[in-house]
Amino acid sequence: MNKTLLPVAAASLIALTTGCSNHESMIEKPDFKANADSVFDIDALEALGRVSNPQVSPDGKKVLFGIAYESVEQNKSNNELYVMNLDRTEPRRITRTADSEQDAVWIDGGSKIAFIAAHDGKPQMWVMNADGSNRHVVSNLENGVSGFKVSPDGKKVVVVSTVKYGRTAQDVYPDLTKATGRLIDDLMYKHWDEWVTEIPHPFVADFDNYRLSNVVDVMDGERFESPMKPFGGIESFAWSPDSKNLVYVSRKKEGMEYALSTNSDLYCYELATGKTRNLTEGMMGYDTNPAFSPDGSKLAWLSMEHDGYESDKNRLFVMDMATGVKTDLTEGWDYTIDQFAWFPQGDRIYFIAPYQGVAPIFSIDLKTKIVDRVTAPEDVCDYAALAPVDGKTLVTMRHSFLYPNEIFKVEDAVAYQLTDVNGEIFDKVERPTCRQVMVPTTDGKLMTTWVLYPPKFDETKKYPAILYCQGGPQQAVSQFWSTRWNLMLMAANGYIVIAPNRRGLPGFGTEWNAQISGDYPGQNMQDYLSAVDYMKQQPYVDGSHIGAVGASYGGFSVYMLAGIHEGRFAAFIAHAGIFNTEAQYLETEEMWFANWDLGGPFWDKNNPVAQRTFANSPHKFVDKWDTPILVTHGEYDFRILSSQGEMAFNAARLRGVPAEMLIFPDENHWILKPQNAIMWQRVFFRWLDRWLKPGSPAALEANASTPAPSSEANTNASTPAAANAPTSASTDSVK
């Protein structure tokens, strides 16, 4: 990796994270002490600072960013703001409060900074001087502010807040003041982790750096959301350079229509007249992330082609604002794009895309459509932000399996490290190593697979292994960093980690990415087994002690593998996984996802794709389950209900298979609260150690207190599963 460190700047930055005026409530950088073996453990993971949101100042000389730390005691995190010169000098902390300052940006030519923080219990927009002085709240919206973007002339701001949606019990029967019932007559009554009682709207207001006034709901009276939940944010809005127009993203559908469609559009709101026009009418998939060129003559955005397919190729489109002509810049580029940013000159666009197991930065020429790689080919990492400085320099973040986000400056394909927030911790622990291997698949292809090896790896020894099953299902297994599914932590605990880029993952062309749709139990399962079989051939892998773990679609994968693995695995862990696809079809909320990826409803007997999917649901193979399994789930998960995990756990116990279940009543699809996260990690490794490390304390304790599996389970352990294993669907059958 190309990097240049400036120890003085790094040390100064770390030093500035200590001390506060309110020690009882302030969350600061923890005083981390490594364990006696210098192993990267759960405590080390929780102690890491989380770097985010680099913003280059208008003069191109400074970068503004955030660092967050967690408090296990308070069970929350706190984000503070910092400024550093781009020559890596003078790092300064500019906030010091018990309330997180989020989403900070430069305004007023760089003399001020705007951000979001709590005020009277609600998130509101604030402004302060660039040095952190004269801090004052500028918004006072009843439902708070979840995002904002100041117009280029500094006189207007769009803020995101919520408006009421749906009926309460009191709306229907005002005399029943204590009634809590929800009267529902259409779909999308719940979404991801909430009952839909309010939706986000954009509000435009006058702004003078001290307060908002004349606040107007851009979508007043419309029962549609903008930005789109659950992941849409302020990137859904773009001011024209002359500040006369605001472009926003919305899927103007509700109820069943909303549940069945991904057809969002870009809408242009003219401030002078209050009129709105659809810029992408007739473009049927997701249209998102609008951004004007510096001169305002063009609008770029990300566009998917197919309605109902949320993981379609993200194309980069550009519209000529004078003529309305739309151009697909990436027609010849066979990879999906995650994010982009204009060059200051407006003749090229930077973008980040998953590519062959990593996520580099590229640029594309508007005239020739030629794509160039901006970052070095030898950079084994993912880039995660784009803040252009000039035509040859940009500020970004990057991470890998082995380190979290730090801020970098990229010039002429060389990445210079600006921050070293967590270097002090990593200097105290032994780190794993990572290699890329190419695994032959059952259909004659080669699959990029990342393999992590424990610290002080010795090829003469044997190690237990873990197969990591990715979620999504179309989420890249690039060099990601996760605070929960942390592959470095798994390897540091003495496991070889196998992370295949199986079918259905981006970064290897649209055909590889699309193959999984309609073929959940097919080729990608064979890809997983191919990766395990390949690694079992290595003399340092203990083939009798291999586990499989995963979340969401990765949880589905674990449940599926449990029925077809033919003795390859000794332990399983499934989080938030689909166990019964028929139940999932009717339990989930985003029906476009179920229709596209599962193939359609199970009652459509004339749909061969759907019928194959449901015939090969994991629950249909429970009779082959013979391997210990841990099930975890959050009860606020409305994407995949916790009943899916409960069914899997019950089935395992009724089969006599050793099983344990960890349910969080206050978590959603993800485990977010610090103490819950620590509990989850402890249970995770306790379970793996119990079954994959025979001499470990967890195994010895369990062996002393747990009875052996029932005779039924033991009998079925010797029963071949191959006869009932699903076969891969052909790509031609996936619509």
Image (spheres, rainbow, N blue to C red):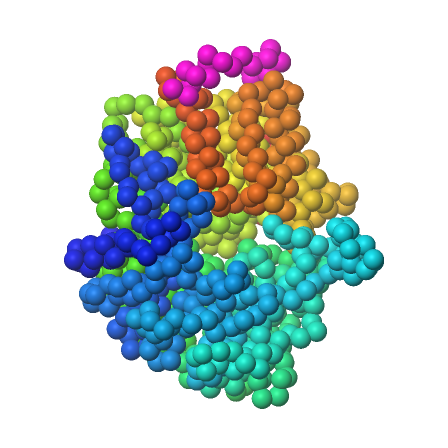
Indicate the quadrant where residue 73 lies: top left
Magenta span: 697-722
Task: Give above or below for 17 relative to 250.
Answer: above
Q: Position of residue 12 (x, y in %)?
A: 21, 57
In the drawing, does residue 36 fall left or right of residue 209? left
In the drawing, does residue 599 fall left or right of residue 633? right
Q: Is residue 43 visible?
A: yes
Q: Is residue 721 visible?
A: no
Identity of the residue furthest to the bottom in this view: 272
What residue is shown at x 35% (from left), y 68% (from top)?
55
Chief SS of the magenta region: helix
Indicate the quadrant where residue 699 lies: top left
What residue is shown at x 57% (from left), y 82% (from top)?
214
Task: Give above or below for 545 relative to 491.
Answer: above
Q: Position of residue 400 (x, y in %)?
A: 34, 48
- How many numbered marks have been drawn onto this rendered protein structure? 0
510 and 71: which is toward the camera:
71
Q: Position of residue 365 (x, y in %)?
A: 38, 73
Q: Position of residue 150 (x, y in %)?
A: 46, 77
313 and 399: which is toward the camera:
399
Task: Give above or below for 316 relative to 585.
Answer: below
In the drawing, does residue 161 fall left or right of residue 459? right
Magenta span contains residue 701? yes
What residue is shown at x 45% (from left), y 21% (from top)?
691
What residue is shown at x 49% (from left), y 46% (from top)?
672
Magenta span contains residue 355? no
